[in-house]
Amino acid sequence: MRYHIITFGCQMNKSDSERIGAVLEAMGYNKALNASKADLIVVNMCSVRQSAVDRVYGLAPWLNNSKAKILTGCVLKPDRAKMSSFFDFIVDKTELYKLPELLRKKAKIKKDYLSVKPSYESSFLAHVPISFGCSNFCTYCAVPYARGKLVSRSHKDVLKEIKDLIKKEYKEIWLLGENVNDYRSPADSRIDFTELIKQIDKIEGKFWLRFTSPHPKDFSLKMVKALAQSPKITPYLNLPLQSGDNEVLRRMNRPYTINSYLGLVKALRSEFRAKKQGLDKELAISTDIIVGFPGETKQAFENTKKAMEKVKFDMAYISQYSPRPQSLCFEKMEDDVAKKEKKAREKALVKVLDKTALLINRKFLNKTAEVLAMEKTKEYLLGKTKHYKTIRFKGNENLIGKFVKVKVTKARAMGLEGNLIKEKLIVVLGPTASGKTDLAIKLAKKFNGELVSADSRMVYKKMDIGTAKPEYPHHLINVVSLKQDFNVALYKEKALKAIEEIIEKGKLPILVGGTGLYVKAIVDNLDFPKIKPDKKMRKELEKKSKQELYSLYKKLDKKGAKTIDKDNKRRLIRAIEVCLLSGKVFSGQRLKQEPLFDALQIGIRKTKEELRKSIEKRTEQMFKKGLEKEAKRLLAKYGKNNPALSTIGYAEWKENKTKEQIKKDIISNTVKFAKRQMTWFEKEKIKWVRNQKEAERLVKKSLE
């Protein structure tokens, strides 16, 4: 059985739909890609404006053909009666626990719907409700009648949900509530909105924190200071004005004046300028405005227009007044502003907005903005800046859900355009035993960097002496067991995550290693085939020798056979596996994409004689440290057919030879391997150096 949810309205409704989806999935339903494939249709309705309600009525002819139909959301009494004719059930969101009984499904659902763990739509942006309903009773608004009076959620539940999201690497969190800053935890009355923000600030990890929708009356000086001091809160605020005329505000039951609103704006902007740094000093403010409210005279409208010109909003959501059933306006105020006049007033305010928004956005020209990449269009990525401005830029799709830097090149009233600034990445490579690790460590110390290993053997735990693992900390060393499958696609995923973490710390990522494919995966942003391992096939392939595997691969992929490491059994098995399962050559599936980084590749140049001496010296040190004992222990525990143990330093111990002969074989095999590495490196764009001084000069120039 499959379900599909149609959501109308605000972010709160979108969040509610995620919880509805979770309830249905707990009942055994799966999400349908589109409504036509669904057995159950759920419509999550909005009643803020009549146009939103009319959209639901517009679904009636189509809904009559659906198998099962449920209406939920903000449903007012008059609409509830009319819509019952084309919905099977109309269910309040607070009664989601009744769905199993209504649909005759077995599932235990918690009565408090906010305690239901959502089925999040996004993997990087989440809406977290902190309250439900509203007790303000603005005369134009139906929310208190559709959602009830304000009820706050326990701060413990809010914090737990956010912590769980950050563990999953979510990048943007929205705190939601119809009157979000009128919050007080039912678990501890001392925790108001200000204290909640402070508690969220303590959660480790890089993420942006936003909230909507606040009420101007509920901002205290303490709250204003806390927002400006918060390291998580972004410099963006939606601050509903609704009208710039005091009499209209009074009739709306909005308990503030235009002067108090302007004072609040001034206080917020002053605090942000005093406490924030760089672009974050400038607080972006959006607002909500209603034109054509009952009794709004031409002078009252002019006052709203003047208020917009004074505040200079970054964005304004302007709507024409729409009478809402059950609201005080609907019952007692005449909708006395003509439709034509409402349109004219809306148009006049849009003109003011376009002018001020363009002037504000031009201030970002030639500046570098931090951006969260949101989605991909045909030619561009679309993202949001900290100031909640939409910006488009060219970039790879795998940047979606990540923070990037974009230099702004164009400014329009409703958005920005720019060029992606790629982060610096230093790559230190060279043949085995060339001294690349020592050089990378010295560069990390001098340039405030952290190291990421690009060695296909160092990823395995317990393979210590035979891989010459360094004592200096590296990312991606000792990350998997010898029993686990590991491939370059997994390496790329983990390496990119490590590099991102290093950049977030404000440090320089340095990739170091001699596994060419690992380096290329990061530098050239290779896209790998999404073929899952076949355990049965692998078990059969592992019985074959490296020579047999290479011959088989050569038949399947002649081009790939020219560049693959013949002595890397694990890689040969993976290449054959991909060829057989996909029906395509392996080499043709590793696609080069737009690079993610501005990479400087530094290679260590050694003569053949120098390299051989280094290999002999390192091999001697390995034997002194106990290579024999380590190799024999691992082969006994994990088996001689383990692909990772079929590499140099371990494979030689499988044969019945003297210790001295094994040492000679390791040296000989390592020299041959170093030669193959250099053949691969010569094809790449590498700056070759002879010493540390030359390398430092290159890094310094790259960072300028």
Image: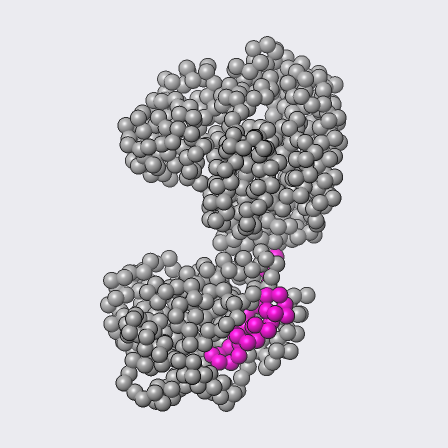
> Which residues, given as a range, are shown in magenta?
421-449
On screen, 554 above or below 99? below
Residue 243, position in %: x, y? Answer: 68, 23
One can see residue 360 in this view: no
| Left or right: residue 578 compared with residue 525 | left
Q: Position of residue 65 (x, y in %)?
A: 33, 26
Q: Residue at x 54, y 17 (%)?
A: 324
Q: How is the image coloured?
A: one colour
Q: Residue at x 47, y 34 (%)?
A: 15
**Residue 256 in which image quadrant:** top right
Residue under the image location 74 percent in, 44 percent down: 274
Q: Is residue 285 magenta?
A: no
Q: Vertical placement of 225 versus 438: above or below?
A: above
Q: Position of residue 284 (x, y in %)?
A: 67, 39
Q: How many marks?
A: 0
Residue closest to the eye, 38 or 388: 388
- Compared to 416, does 458 lie above or below? below
